[in-house]
Image (tube, grey):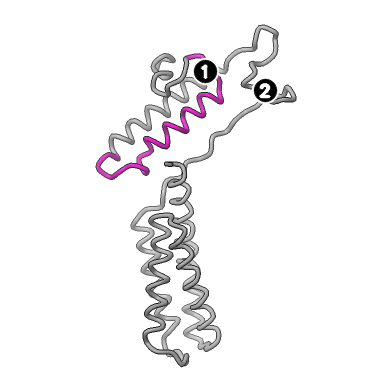
Amino acid sequence: MERDEAARLLGVRPDASRPEVEKAFQHMARLTHPDLVPAERAEAARVQFQRIEAARRTLLATVPGPAPSGRAAPDDVDPYGRRRFDVPPAVLPPMSTRLVALWSVLLLAAFVLAHLRSDAPLTLLDPVLRGLALEAGLTGWALTGNRRLLVLGIVALIATVITVTLFATIVGLMGTLLMAPSVIGLLGAGQRRYVLVRMSR
């Protein structure tokens, strides 16, 4: 790719400094990343994202030379005269929907196991409501990055751990421990989604 074409793609001058190129690339990445657009536009977005990645590589392949004074260009040095290298933040794709669904199913199975043969003096409605809140909260967080759903899931999780601990049985404790991998997986998926949602704004 020619330098002029790369500059047009990113909307910068052909002789743009490294920070200018990185800033333009990050802006374009938020607009064209395949994971941040509707499914019907994902393929076109993937092609465009590959083009702007190539444009970024082209523009950064040749670091601008020193200024006439013999010092590095102002954009490339910090206030103390040291050379500055800006590393753009990594853009992590969201976890696969299938993987999120697997974590969700495993969480539900572990939750049911945690309440088998429970001696808790509670109505059947209590574990059902907590289970729904737990699933909706953590799975919703994983899929949308909505922090309100995260709070709902965490509250339901804490209530479940307290209930199972107070009326502990071997099966209940095993179920609670088996919930841990699913909870960690869903929390991680939600964090990725949250970061991507914030970047797209």
The one nearer the camera, 140 or 4, is 140
Q: Which mark is residue 16?
A: 1
Where does the image place residue 162, in percent across and percent down from the top left?
A: 54, 80
In magenta segment, residue 15: yes
Cα distance, mark 2 to mark 1? 15 Å
What kind of residue is marked 1? Ala
Where does the image place residue 19, in percent across and percent down from the top left?
A: 56, 26
What SS does tag 1 mark? loop
Q: Which mark is residue 141?
A: none
| Residue farthest top in this picture | 68
Q: What's the residue at 37%, 53% (across, down)?
A: 96
Would you call the spot at circle 1 few (<14 residues within 10 Å), some (14-19), or many (20 or more)? some
Would you call the spot at circle 2 few (<14 residues within 10 Å), some (14-19), or many (20 or more)? some
Where does the image place residue 117, in percent across and percent down from the top left?
A: 43, 90
Where does the image place residue 114, in percent across and percent down from the top left?
A: 45, 81
The overriding secondary structure of the stretch rendered in magenta is helix
Q: Is residue 168 above or below residue 150?
A: below
Q: Is residue 141 above or below residue 192?
A: below
| Residue farthest right in this picture | 80
Mark positioned earlier in the residue sequence (2 or 1): 1
In magenta segment, residue 25: yes
Segment tinted magenta in the rendering: 14-42
Q: What's the residue at 55%, 83% (across, down)?
A: 165
What SS does tag 2 mark? loop
The one nearer the camera, 47 or 120, is 120
**For the N terminus, which image quadrant?**
top left
Task: Report which residue position mark 2 lands on.
Answer: 77
**Badge 2 vs badge 1, beta-carbon distance below 8 Å:** no
